[in-house]
Image (cartoon, rainbow, N blue to C red):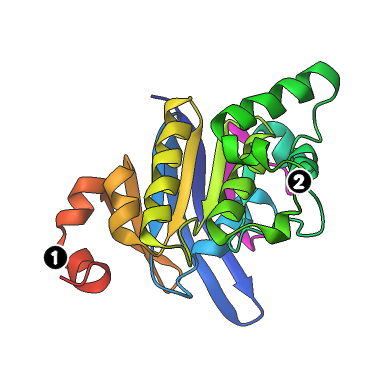
Amino acid sequence: MSTMLSISKLNVRYGHIEALRDIDIEADEGEIYSIIGSNGAGKTSLLKAVSGLVKPQSGVIKFNGEVLSSKPYKIVEKGIVHVPEGRKTFSGLTIKDNLLIGGYLSSGKDLNERLEKQYKLFPILKDRSAQHAGTLSGGEQQMLAISRGLMGNPKMILLDEPSLGLAPIIVNQIYDLIKQIRESGITVFLVEQNARKALSICDKACVLENGRIVLRGNGQELLKSEQVKKAYLGG
């Protein structure tokens, strides 16, 4: 598999606070790459650096061998879509309008085809297409947020804490969906506090602590790591 996302010597600061320090990551095309760590470890800052929402102090981010623009809309045009923590749906707009916003790069027949594709993947969104997003449950809003991201026809999707605040049965549904996304050929860059879930489905992973990568390997290796068990799995 070829390297899709390459991050080298990435440093992000907020004033005097070092959020990320010398981050090196290579995520291959068609895989799920998980980043686990506690609150404040730098996970969200990493995703925001990739999607252009924060400007790194130094380092290089490449996508399919090309240095990424620092402008978020150009990054979306390249094929990277960011689904933020907390879902961030447009609560006063209908489900359909939320999806159409996600497909802003398309028009006409192409846009309608993408919409129908999402309705097949998420039948509940089709059934409630005229309903305001703010009236959905947390799990339904998370499905809408992911579906809105997929409307952009991404090559890579960045998922920030997709299981946050959801009931266990809904978390299982979300993770089944993440596996489906990968099977469709989209590379997944997954940030999670739910370490067990994230490591159980990923191809590769790393552990962030205080802005640094302290451990890396494949999902099964990290699930068996005593360091990971003690810190994140309650073992």
The answer to whether residue 90 is left or right of residue 189 is right
Residue holding disc 2 = 98
Region in magenta: 55-71
- Residue 51, placed above or below residue 119: below
Furthest-right residue in view? 108
On the image, the x and y values in percent for residue 197 come to 32, 54
The answer to whether residue 213 is left or right of residue 118 is left
In terms of image quadrants, where is residue 171?
bottom left
Q: Earlier in the sequence, mark 2 or mark 1?
A: 2
Is 133 or 225 nearer to us in this picture? 133
The residue shown at (64%, 40%) is: 125
Disc 2 on helix, strand or loop?
Answer: helix
Furthest-top residue in view? 109
The residue shown at (58%, 59%) is: 137
Q: Residues within 10 Å of mark 1 (few under 14, many from 20)?
A: few
Disc 1 on helix, strand or loop?
Answer: helix
Residue holding disc 1 = 226
The answer to whether one can see residue 54 in this image is no
On the image, the x and y values in percent for residue 52 come to 69, 52
How many labels sit on residues? 2
On the image, the x and y values in percent for residue 110 come to 77, 19
The residue shown at (47%, 61%) is: 22
Amino acid bearing label 2: Asn
In terms of image quadrants, where is residue 2?
top left
